[in-house]
Amino acid sequence: MPMRSLVSGLLALALLGAWPAQVAAQPKSIPATFAAGATAIKPAVYGLEVPASAGRDEESEPLSATEFLRKLFGGLPEGKLGAAVMIDPSGVAVTSARLVRGLADVELVAVDGERHAATVIGRDERTDVAVLRVRTTAARLTAATLANSDDVRVGDWVLAVGSPYGFEASVSAGIISARPRVSPAGQYDDNLQTDAAVNPGSLGGPLVNAQGAVVGLTVTPGPRGSGIAFAVPANVVRRVSDEIISHGKVLRGWLGIVSQAVTPELASAFGAPVPRGVLVADVVDDGPAARAGIQRGALLLALDDRMLRGPGDIEAHLTRTRQGQRLSVHLWWHGREDTVAIVLGDEPEPYQKSRRAARVLGLLVDALTPEAGLVVVAIRPGSGAAAAEVWEGDIVREIDGQRVLTLPEFERATQRLTPGAEVTVLLQRGARIFYVVVPVVEAPTLVGRE
């Protein structure tokens, strides 16, 4: 046999010998079945329903949870809100904060049909996480395991578990499509994106890995059929739930700035050599950043040596901090890089929400800071605000030419509006500032001093 043929034959045999080993290695990364993970998580996932006797707080009128889901999807069975996942066997569960907005009590329905009355003990609107506690239980309940979501990678397999269209304990599979992601409906910018199907009734349920451990809490679906949904990472869910149980709210450090993403054009305009970091668009007077000498137009490059890619990185970092903690801030200012120390403040309590505008314009606003303005937190379907395509998360700057940075200013600007009138509203959506015309479709109803 010619030497070349002999070598070719030996090489072919060597490759054939190696091939079965490569095939055998594949099941380690691509699960042959998700049965083990689905079996492990199902007993900890509950359908979330409104008790027949439940009443809603007036603040939730502009957009109840059922209205939100029906507007988004249509066809959700009456009384059903979504899903929840038990995270502590003593009876502590978590779900999406938007689903229980305005509710004090809910019902959790187990996969075997057993019902548990539960109390909403707290909500964190920033992350869209709510904590529930089962009021009475004779036995310890099956609870899910929260994974370390920092280990979750783009491309990892995940399962979304919930009760789509009322079909209890349904499972859909997908992958982590991207991270971090800004949720279209939330204020937290470090979410997981997945292509696992999240349908009506699955919102508020867990996103789990192939072993059944929770890597995220699904809080925002994409448009129908889009193959996109968003989940708050499990590590954030763990901290938020612990804080709510211990303190009744999430304790966060506060910088006292309004930030925005840096584009190449903005970087060039402010003299930065590369488009990185976060641009300071506003600074709260006498806030922590102002006391450290930070001004509008500064580019924050890093917090405690953690590089900043966008505003979401600031939010994610502050979620892990407390009042009084000292941060090292690396920034670009006046053509040079510098490092300053900031002692974080206590995040101010938001002002009471404006109910009058909810009836007059169909939108509910809340205060960010006295200098940062008002954020739209809810839109009532069929209202003037909905017709004008105002979005949750929009910042309201002016009403008919009047500046409205605080709730009292907002109340004064909307006090004399009458049905049939139209009002010009200046909005900010990200870096974009624009006007919309909002028709007044309801007469104002006074509900007491805000």
Image: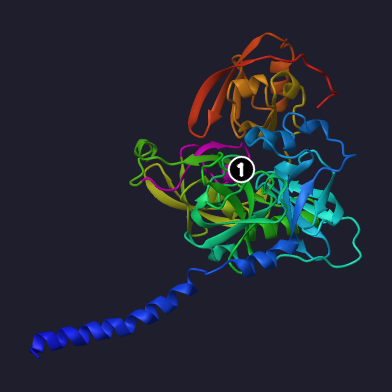
Camera-side residue of 330 and 146: 146
Across the whole image, how many numbered discs are drawn on residues?
Answer: 1
Q: Position of residue 53 (x, y in %)?
A: 90, 39
Q: Is residue 147 visible?
A: no
Residue at 70%, 33% (x, y): give it: 366
Q: Position of residue 228 (x, y in %)?
A: 53, 46
Q: Is residue 46 magenta?
A: no
Residue type marked 1? Gln
Residue at 65%, 64% (x, y): give it: 38
Above or below 207: residue 203 = above
Camera-side residue of 303 and 363: 363
Q: Position of residue 380 (x, y in %)?
A: 70, 27
Q: Position of residue 267 (x, y in %)?
A: 37, 40
Q: Is residue 24 visible?
A: yes
Camera-side residue of 323 and 292: 323
Above or below 168: residue 378 = above
Camera-side residue of 373 and 207: 207
Quick one: quadrant of the C terminus? top right
Name the side, left or right, on which 376 lies relative to 443: left
Above or below 59: residue 87 = below
Q: Which residues are magenta?
A: 275-297
Q: Is residue 294 magenta?
A: yes
Q: Which residue is mark 1?
A: 187
Quick one: quadrant of the N terminus? bottom left
Above or below 213: residue 263 = above
Residue at the extreme left = 2
